[in-house]
Amino acid sequence: MVRFPSLLAALLTASTAFLLSAGAVHADELQDIGKLLKQGQQAQALERVNQYLAQKPKDAQGRFLKGLILTEQNKAADAIDVFTKLTQDYPELPEPYNNLAVLYAAQGQYEKARQSLEMSIRTHPAYATAYENLGDVYTKLASQAYDKALQLDSGNAGAQSKLALIRDLIGGRGQQRPTASTSGGRINEQQRPGQAVVASAQKAAAPAAPAAPAAAPAASATPPAAEAKSAKAPEKAAEPKTGNDDVVKAVRTWAAAWASKDVNGYLAHYAKEFKAPKGESRADWEKGRRQRIMAPKKIEVGVESPKVRMIDDTHATVTFRQNYRSDSLSISSTKTLSLVRVNDRWLIREERVGS
């Protein structure tokens, strides 16, 4: 499942776009606060942002930054209060809802996380991060529901199979933390808020605070007519170029064998040194995979936007969006495969789910 990343991982880089869209003085001030936060100087960053907000209490960008600082300080209740008030003042913005979901999920409040993410998507139907987070939250809710079903009926074979499949697809991780939004920008005032592009580790588009010269927060705010700029739609990830094609071909062949329920062909894509999850023996892992592949009547496995990183001539990793669907389950997740080339074949050494 998606891990709960440090909110600082891409803060400084991702913040640049929306900070530069503010006035120069304001941009410098907020960038400086962001740098303090990135350097781990949370107390100093909080003091500075409070001083900033004392002069501009309605500035959505500064308020969003304060929410990030409080989150990094593990002051979840205070951060929730900040993001909640942002949703009340700027209900058209998706990022505060998304970050509320992150905080709720960290507390195990998955139903509240679901509601927040659905609001985020309602305001911004093209918000990919929120969709991914919602899928992860639904997965956790499904896991809890199947667990409850088995508590009530331990012999429920259907629930056992579905729970095992979910755990297998998410790599056996027990906790799930959605991705927080840390970036923002502007949208054109004649563009619907839902058309703005936002992503936690990507460039985002978000509006600026109304009736104020400051630009929108990482979460965003209502755009002023005179200053708004058009947001660009996210570019689709390019397919790997020549040199990586063999790796992508191996992954697609592996997925095709899985989808066609060719178990022997599927297992043949794993190297001898493959590390089975949860410390299982290779034999036990293969037995479990056979059962789970053969159980559904129909399987579809999609490989979307693969990104290859060549480590050397014989080692590579590929990260992609895996879209799995059977007659009993549908789930989408990010998967990373580590591969090794053996006799001109790329074989899987390790696999993990999540970014």
Image (cartoon, rainbow, N blue to C red):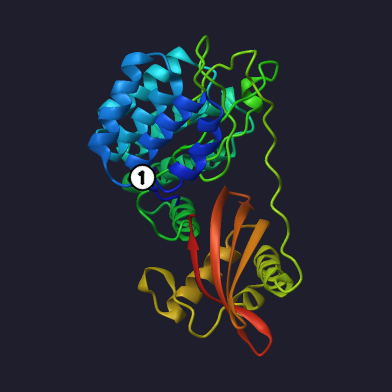
Q: Amino acid at mark 1?
A: Lys
Q: Secondary structure at mark 1?
A: helix
State the residue in front, 319 or 16.
Answer: 16
- Can residue 288 be seen at all in this image of the molecule? yes
Q: Residue at x 33, y 44 (%)?
A: 152
Residue farthest bottom in this picture: 343
Q: Which residue is depicted at the point 64% across and 20% down?
A: 228
Q: Residues within 10 Å of mark 1 (few under 14, many from 20)?
A: many
Count every numbered label the image shows and give the total.
1
Vertical relation: 291 (above or below) 159: below
Residue placed under numbered mark 1 in the picture: 38
Give the percent coordinates (x, y) of residue 94: 52, 27
- Residue 164, position in %: x, y? 45, 58
Residue at image location 48% in from the left, 55% down from the top: 354
Residue 15 relative to residue 85: left or right: right
* Whole-percent x, y for residue 210 in the image: 52, 12
